[in-house]
Image (spheres, rainbow, N blue to C red):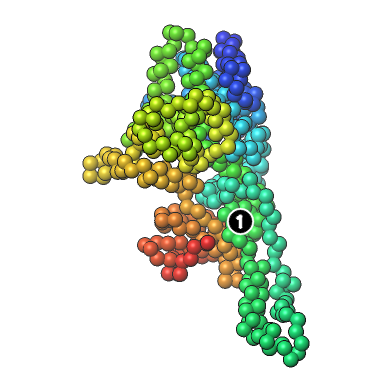
Amino acid sequence: MASIPQHLWDIKEHIREEASQRWGLDFFETIFEIVDYKKINELAAYGGFPTRYPHWRFGMEYEQLSKSSEYGLSKIYEMVINNDPSYAYLLEGNNMVDQKTVIAHVYAHVDFFKNNYYFSKTNRRMVDEMANHAARVRRYIDRKGIEKVEDYIDTCLSVDNLIDYYSPFIVRQRSQEYTEEDSSTDEVPKFAAKDYMESYINPESFLDEQRKKLEEDAKKRRRFPSSPERDVMGFVLEHAPLDGWEADILSIIREEAYYFAPQGQTKIMNEGWASYWHEKILTHGVLEPSEIIDFADINSRVLSTSPGQMNPYKLGVELYRDIEERWDTGRFGKEWENEDSLEARATWNKELGLGRDKIFEVRKLYNDVTFIDEFLTEDFARRNKMFSYIFNKKSNQWEIESREFKKIKSRLLDQLTNFGQPFIYVIDGNYKNRSELLLHHDFQGVELRTDYAKGVLKALFRLWKRPVNIQTMLDKKGVMLTYNGSEHTEKSIDYAPLS
């Protein structure tokens, strides 16, 4: 890695000034470095970080990226890390228009990292933290051997999506563990009454009802956890009988999972925001006239789409443009929604000029799910020819499945909610009073892939060291899948939703 040359430094400073002074972007200090093809592939394999713990998957990803680049299948133009200061890498083979585009794109990304709510709980010193993680894992490799540590990391990575993506924003206390004191027999509450009135004031039916309530309360006190726990990794880390080095590595994988989570939660918004601003910044005083055509070519490739695929850059930037136009012209609120005249809607312009403030507000407060849910309108879908696609195996091509807006929007939200992954909860850490782990799949119409489920159960057994069970729905029937350390079993149950 090398510092950028003076002429590129001058361009970078010009773009930084334009982004902050003219357009109001607010970003961390950003350090740019020039890297060659080999180095940028290495960094990409490491998730953008110069140092990560040793593991075979990074080598595999590096080989895939290298082959893809070598055969012209893909090219990495830029990479930026959510950190303070932020670090960004420029590919030395890029031409000047590429470099300008990347620099402007990076500053917009860093503005998003700094100001979006869902990044507010992330570690802003993660470059140092990743290096610390690497040093700790290497110490365990020296002591335990690389095969044992890598195998355990594989296990942890198999469950790194079993976290509660919203838990960093929730302040709560863990319920205290159940003790024998909690099981003491409480007196059944009664109304005060004279002896001769006892049977009338406190009838046996009333006392039976109070006893049942006390029993239910006792069960709740004994439940472990007291309420369904979505952060499965956190629960296992806190309660599984792990050795010190095992707990430390699991905590490392979990910490990194939470760090990367907001990037998955805001992929459309983040890429759309960066694409919106690199175009705005470059076409208003940064590009030379002779560079406009090259930039248009680069930008068209960034925003291109294919049937059956969603381009987050394209969808994000078009939604920001739509929001800006709607709030500039007043095409929002009850008055606009209640207007039935096509002619009035076509010429509607209240000249409010609120668009720029609105997109900055959206950038700050939303994630992809809420962004799409609130701002993807039927008018927008129609103008941008948004369809629901399905792959036809007979013709071996993508075909339009539906033009119905509600179905299109619902399908997109399903893909984005929890990254399209199932909702899994811990509901009992002492199932059957045998220290077994009981999980619950919150079934919402999509069944678990049993091969994936069995792999996760096996990984959790490795951590929990006792049988692991999960309640789910398969073929419209309640099923309990279990792994006891040697075999997988399946039995029918009465499946009940959590709520």
Q: Position of residue 297 (x, y in %)?
A: 39, 18
Left-right relation of 293 to 328? left
Measured along the vertical axis of the image, is residue 21 above or below residue 388? above
Q: Amino acid at mark 1?
A: Val
Q: Which residue ends up furthest to the bottom in the rendered image?
A: 196
Q: Residue at x 29, y 40 (%)?
A: 400
Q: Foreground residue, 138 or 371?
A: 371
Q: Position of residue 373 (x, y in %)?
A: 47, 42
Q: Residue at x 52, y 12 (%)?
A: 286
Say if residue 71 shows up in the picture: yes
Left-right relation of 211 to 476? right
Q: Position of residue 317 (x, y in %)?
A: 46, 29
Numbered marks: total: 1
Q: Quadrant of the N terminus?
A: top right
Measured along the vertical axis of the image, is residue 114 above or below residue 200? above
Q: Picture quarter containing residue 235?
A: bottom right
Say if residue 73 shows up in the picture: no
Q: Residue at x 44, y 56 (%)?
A: 444
Identify the element where label 1 is drawn: helix
Residue underneath mark 1: 236
